[in-house]
Amino acid sequence: MSINGKPFAIIGAGLAGLTAANYLKRNAVPFVLFEAGPKIAGLASSFKDDEGFSYDFGAHFVTNRLAAAIGVSADCRVVHHYSETVWLKGKSYGYPFGLMSMPRFSFSAMVSRLKRKTETETAADYFRGEYGNALADEVALPLLEAWSGAPANELSASVGNKLANSIVKTLWLKLAGKISRRAIACGYSHEMPESANVWHVYPNGGISTLCKKLADGLDANIKLESPVESIVIEDNRAAKVRVKGEEIEVAGVISTAPINILAKLVKGTDALKSLHAFRYRPMVFVNLRFEGRGLLPDVVTWTPEKHFPFFRLTEATLSMPWLAPEGKTLITADIGCEVGDEIWTKSDDELGELCLRGLEKIIPNAREKYKGCRVLKTPIAYPVYLAEYEAKREEIEKSLGIEGLISIGRNGEFAHILMEDVYWRTLKRMRLFVRENQFPTQIENAKSIAISSSICI
Amino acid sequence: MQTNENKQNDSNSELLLTSVLCCVCETDDAKPVGVGTDFEYNTSRNTFLAMQCHSCGLVYLNPRPSVDEFDRIYPSNYHAFDFSENNFGFVYKVRRRLEARRLLSWCKGLKADAKIIDVGCGDGFHLDLLKEFGNKSWTIEGIDTSERAVTAAEKKGLKVHPGSVEQLELENESYDLAFLIQTIEHLETPDKVLDSVRRLLKPGGKIVIVTDNTDSPDFKLFKGGYWGGYHFPRHWNLFNKKTLSALAQKVDLEVVSINTIVSPVNWVYSIRNTLVDLNYPKWLVNRFSLGSTASLSAFTLFDYTFQLLGKGALLNGVLRRPE
């Protein structure tokens, strides 16, 4: 079978879809990219309001390495500082070293390290084994549950499977960051090595600059407001896509849709039926505007205690002062929820009030400084690694089982991977996919390569 | 020298970049090993990536500046254009002596009527040495794409062909020896250039290549970004023994030998780049340059120990056109 000029179809114009498109363009492989929405960038989009506050829909950070790979490095600013803290019993503890300086946590962590490791199946076992009971029960597991919306003993251990840097490496990267006054990426990329030469940057035009650059010169191949209605599978091969009622023959399909949606799109096979069960955690991001700066102890403050309505607070201006007008700040409160539940249906003002009440426990005069909020909601913020479908998840990590169909990107891979990893992994998978499907005789040698996954909160 | 105003404009606009494949195996399956900027000449604000090919191990710049940006990435004060005594003093004299000895060792066995060509001769430093210390009956010529370099070389009374070896129509099978001394790493298509050089050589004629070695301790230590051999963004392809012999094979050249030679330059510049990037004071940065005798001498001794182990900072390949 030869493609004979049939194009590949890409579904979705976010970072992954555009990286795939750019790759195909560079290799002179014909393709059409279908985007359901009116503009490109997807989860990687950003905008600025009239008062001068900038909002990134998803990611805040990329690295100088990603910016260089995409070709926008000259138009980026260096992020000088990034660190996280955990708020416990009215005080903040730096992550990870501040937490470990509490005897209760370091002792239990040491005990767990000394114990013989057994096979762990659930996330609860995994974190207790890795961090010790005290740290797991008071910090890691409450955060995990708020984030995922599922009990930790129903989540798969692979949720914690990010192979963190060793303590020595973490110390070295933190030290290098202090010396160079740069936010050196630490625990950000699992696909490529971290080093003192890789730090966070922010594009002058916002995070969506990356997507705009990737989409450069692809106008003729990108169809906006063109949702793919179905993917037709013939002889276990993706043969056609239906868009606006019209069927188009394709050489293959590259999907960035959430995999439970992909399962619905696919017609003519039952192979993806079990993917309907896969869940994504909806999330409400409440962006609160305040007078002043440095209201929170750190860029990211984790709040594991149940009396807080949110589980994470981000004062991005501590990393990137340019995201708010001078003398003002923006705090983003993350609240996990379900579509249609009490949180999801609250008005912006109600959510602002809810967060403000929580924030007053950390910033006593928060109410005086409060200037209003803007709420972003997404039904697909994070994949939820339930133990019940873990076996299937591992299976689709390797292959969907349908010729000529791959699922890429953060939602498509069902993996909590950040911007840079989305980019490198997409390239890696595209290389293989094009080789397999453009010249199907060479399939055998390419098939043996498995793709590993990594997850982090 | 450029005016300050010029420099400002230059370094603020975005460089035009292109994506490329590995020149040895023609694939794009590579991972980033080094991330850095133009530490030495600050010709742009861009950050560059040194990629390492998964299949052969070649280290190459990708994406890299378009060839239209040559005038910008090789500024007028670029060292290869004017390596004069005034600039570098004592070190220059020592280097001349050492280089002359090395050059003549590669010329052993050449006949009286031998023709030698230096591809990428710059301001003619090596040609000049051959003229002064070599056999007077040899024919000595150079090639360089840079007009400024050609002008500088011609001032010394050297014969230099302006242009690229692929485009110049020099007589095939007429040369006995070709040099590519710190040239191959600057080339857009090293395979095509070597192929063209091979055509110029008589059967059995040799090519001597000197280039930065990626199988060296200085690379290992500084490969994250500060390695002097990256010379961001001017070194486009960086080799080790394995990749250089793979490239030779690709263009039908036999490998006579590939060894390493001592050089302090990448050590000194790796340290310099680190200091520059971390904003150390100028007086300290200037302790590490081509003009600083102390650091060059110290690192020559240092690299000598690695050279004994076959891991000197420079790679020296001798290739031959099959008979």
Image (tube, coloured by chain):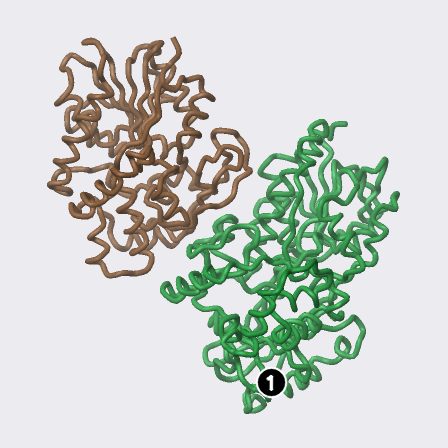
Chain colours: A green, B brown
- The local crowd at label 1, few if under 14, some if 14 to 19, many if 20 or more residues have their Cα within 10 Å, is many
* Image point (36%, 39%), residue name: B216
Q: Nearer the viewer, residue A193 or B61?
A: A193
Q: Quadrant of the C terminus of chain B?
A: top left
Which residue is disc 1 drawn over? A359
* Image point (41%, 51%), residue name: B46
Apparent side of residue A213 relative to residue B133 in the rendered image (left or right): right
Q: Position of residue B111 (x, y in %)?
A: 21, 9
User: Dot 1 lies on which element?
Assistant: helix
**Residue A204 visible, this angle:** no
Among the 4 quarters of the image, the one containing residue B195: top left
Q: Position of residue B235 (x, y in %)?
A: 37, 39
Q: Nearer the viewer, residue A140 or A333?
A: A140
Among the 4 quarters of the image, the one containing residue B212: top left
Chain of the residue displaying label 1: A
Q: Position of residue A17 (x, y in %)?
A: 66, 49
Among the 4 quarters of the image, the one containing residue A250: top right
Apparent side of residue A128 relative to residue B171 in the rendered image (left or right): right
Residue B88, relative to residue A365: is it above or below? Answer: above
Q: Nearer the viewer, residue B157 or A232?
A: A232
Apparent side of residue B259 relative to residue A391 in the rendered image (left or right): left
Q: Position of residue B222 (x, y in %)?
A: 37, 48
Apparent side of residue B93 relative to residue B259 in the rendered image (left or right): left
Residue B300, relative to residue B23: is it above or below? Answer: below
Q: Nearer the viewer, residue A223 or B249?
A: B249
Residue B287, relative to residue B308: is it above or below? Answer: below
Residue A264, relative to residue A149: is it above or below? Answer: above
Q: Amino acid at mark 1?
A: Leu
**Residue B125 visible, this angle:** yes
